[in-house]
Image (spheres, helix red, strand yellow):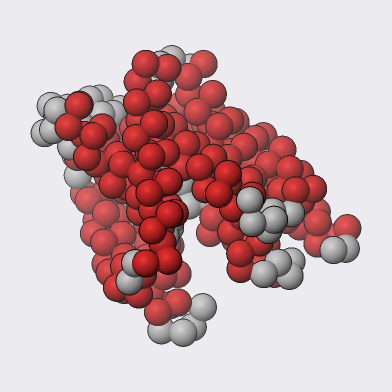
Amino acid sequence: MSPDTFLFCVAAALAAGFVDAIAGGGGLVTVPALTLAGLDPVSTLATNKLQSAFGSGSALRAFARAGQVEAGEARPVAIGAGLGALAGAALVAHLPLRFLAAALPAALALAALYFALSPKLSDVATRPRMGQARFRALVVPLVGFYDGVFGPGAGSFYMLGFVALRGLGALKATALTKAANFASNLVALALLAATGHVWWSLGLAMGAAQFVGARLGARAAIRGGAALIRPMLVAICLAVAGKLALGQLGVL
């Protein structure tokens, strides 16, 4: 790989870390960058999980230091997401992914509509519609399972659950989403690393850039609150939905 291509991937990771810390969807930046750099699909996925773990971990740490999430809150979410991702990754070869891929654009478009119109997405918590224990036992592992199987838009689905079902404010929901993303990234990385497809030097360099970008993004989210998080969530949901829809049509 040429130095210019290497630096291009690192720069992409910096931008992705900033965006992902606020609304998710950093893979929309890094996966195309890794593909353009010449990595095969499996190496792209494996290396992307390595650098993504740095970003989600950095964002989670920044939110925790700002008092937006505590270890007692994040730990059960991370465990549920990690177990779900492990089950999804183990079963991925036996699942009809074409049906999931076909349904996702519509699901993400509906999520974007919810985030755009719902008065619940604010910095103030509202009355929960589902108990905490049931949410952690059912919804978190289910989204984690999806992340282990497929992945795109998982952060948006976590956010949707935390806001619509648990009634959390935007910052708290974003912080807990990073805990879930961090766990599922680590699980997927552990499984993919065993295949020998991780480009460690590139992934670690991109991870360092992700760490910095995610820290900056988390700080921006803490300062801007729902006024920043809401439009970015809508944009990310629509961007992922569009990419998946075009992929189904053979355009991307």
Q: Is residue 27 or residue 145 the one in the foreground? A: 145
Q: Is residue 122 left or right of residue 11?
A: left
Identified at 41% across, 84% down, the residue is 249
Q: Is residue 54 visible?
A: yes
Q: Is residue 81 above or below residue 97?
A: above
Identified at 24% across, 41% down, the residue is 139
Identified at 29% across, 55% down, the residue is 112
Q: Position of residue 8 (x, y in %)?
A: 76, 57
Identified at 68% across, 41% down, the residue is 207
Q: Is residue 66 left or right of residue 77?
A: right
Q: Is residue 61 left or right of residue 135?
A: right
Q: Is residue 217 visible?
A: no
Q: Is residue 130 above or below residue 13?
A: above
**Picture quarter containing residue 9?**
bottom right
**Picture quarter containing residue 186?**
top right
Total tally of numbered discs in the picture? 0
Q: Position of residue 63 (x, y in %)?
A: 48, 24
Q: Position of residue 74 (x, y in %)?
A: 39, 24
Q: Is residue 50 above or below residue 120?
A: below
Q: Is residue 147 or residue 24 the one in the foreground? A: 147
Q: Position of residue 190 (x, y in %)?
A: 58, 44
Residue that protrudes farthest toward the bottom in the picture: 250
**Quarter of the figure with the N terminus:** bottom right
